[in-house]
Amino acid sequence: MIPSVLPTYNRAPLSFVKGEGSWLIEENGRRYLDLCAGIATTALGHAHPALVAALTEQANRLWHVSNLYRIPEQQALADALTDKTFADTVFFTNSGTEACELAVKMARKHHHDAGRPERTEILTFEGNFHGRSGAAIAASGAEKMVKGFAPLMPGFTILPFGDHDALRAAVSEKTAAILVEPILGEGGIKPLPDQCLKGLRDLCDEHGVLLILDEVQCGMGRTGRLFAHEWAGIEPDIMMVAKGIGGGFPLGAVLATEDAASGMVAGTHGSTYGGNPLGCAVGAKVLEIVSDPDFLAEVNRKAGLLRQKLEGLVAAHPDVFDHVRGEGLMLGLVCKATNTDVVQAGYDQEMLLVPAAENVVRLLPALTIADEEIAETVARLDRAAQAVSAKQPA
Ligand SMILES: Cc1ncc(COP(=O)(O)O)c(C=O)c1O
C-alpha cells in the first residue's frame, strides 16, 4: 500500500522534535550534530533567537496579504538586497525551484522584448541541479530526474562540465542565457574556478547572452562572502537565491539587473505566497545578520579551521577519503569508500551528513557553528571513518 506521504524520498529512520543551533534532538533526547542544516537552509542554525523574534513579532501582526497590495516587509527586503548586491530588482518566491522558473522566463522575455525572439535557448552544464519543476529538470537533463517525465520543456542544452571548447561552440544566435551554479551542490560540491566564472561573464558579454547564477545552495554567506560569485569579481545578470535566505522559512528570490528584468512588466509573473510578510520579515533579519562583515569574517575563519581539520582527517583515513573540496562552509569529502556508507556511519555517531554526486559526502553546517562543534564534527567523522574502514573488504 502506498504510504500516506508520497514515497519520493528514501528517508533515514530519524525524526526530530527540536532544534538548537547546530543540534537536532529526537523525542528520546538523542542529540545529533547537524552538518546538513536542511541542506544549507538553516544558515543561522535552529531556533536562532533573532529569527524566532522576527517571525513571532510578524506572526502577531500580519501573516498574509496578496501581492495585489504593497507589502512593506517585502519592500524592505528588496531594498536591502538591491543595496547589498549587483541587482536592481527582486521577485520573491517560496523556493529555489520557483526561482529557476522565473529566471528562465525572465531571460527569454528579455530577448523577446528586445526584438530577438529567436534567443530562447539556455545553456547549462552536466551535474547541475536547479529543482524538480519542468524547467528545472529540463535544465538538468540527468537521467534520474527526467526519466518518465517526457515531453521535457524544450530549449535547454546541457554541456560537459569544464569543456570550454564545447561551450564556445554551443553559443549561437539562439542562446538566451547561460545558467550555472558557482559551486555545484547536488553535483558534488564542485566549485567553478574564478577564472571560469570570469570567462563565462566575458563570453556572455561578447555574445549578448545573459548570465544566470544559481546561488540557491552556495549563496547567503556560505562561502564567506554574501554571494559566491563575489570571489570571482564578476556580476551576473540574474541570480537565483533560496534556502539560506529564509533560515528555514520557505523563501526564495530572483535578483536581476534592470536590463535583464526589462520584460517582466505587470501581468507577466506572479505568486500567491511569494514575498509574504512572514517570509520577508525573517529574510530581512537573516540578511542583516549574514551580510555583516564581522559575521562573514567569522564564517571564513571557521571555514579555515574546519578545512584544516578535514585535511588531517583525510590524511588519517586514506582508505576512506580521497580529498576535500569546496569553499567556505560548503565542503565535500570526496570518498574512496561508498559515500552513503560514510553518511550511515555518521548517523551511528549521531551526526547528520549529506551525500552528493561523484561519491561525495557534503558538510553544510550552520554558519554559526562553534569552534568546539567543529572539533566535535571531526572527532565524530574520525570514528565514522574507522567504522567504515573496519567494514571495507581487505
Ligand atoms: C543549486 C540549487 N538550485 C535549486 C534548488 C531547488 O531549490 P528548492 O528545493 O528550494 O526548490 C536546489 C535545491 O537543492 C539547489 O541546491
Image (spheres, helix red, strand yellow):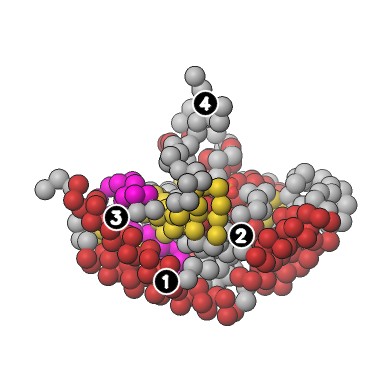
Which of 216 and 110 lies nearest the eye of the viewer? 216
Instruction: Please tell me how crowded label 2 is: few (under 14), some (14-19), or many (20+) other residues with Cα within 10 Å.
Output: some
Q: Residue furthest front?
A: 28
> Which mark, residue 318?
none
Q: Are marks 3 and 1 in contact (CB under 8 Å)?
A: no
Percent of width and height locating residue 146: 48, 35
Q: Give residue 372's mark.
A: 1
Measured Cα–Cα span from mark 3 to mark 1: 18 Å
Q: Is residue 340 magenta?
A: yes
Residue at image mark 3: 384
Q: CA distance from mark 2 to mark 4?
A: 30 Å
Tell me, for residue 47, which label it has, or none.
Answer: 2
Q: Which residue is mark 4?
A: 3
Residue at image coords 30%, 69%: 311
Q: Give the residue furthest to the top.
A: 1
> In the structure shown, which secondary structural element does the residue marked by tag 4 occupy?
loop
N-terminal of the pair, mark 4 or mark 3, is: 4
- Mark 4 Cα within 10 Å, few/some/many (few <14, many 20+)? few
Where residue 332 appears, as percent x and y from the top left, is 38, 59
Alpha-carbon distance for marks 2 and 1?
19 Å
Q: Residue at x 20, y 53 (%)?
A: 389
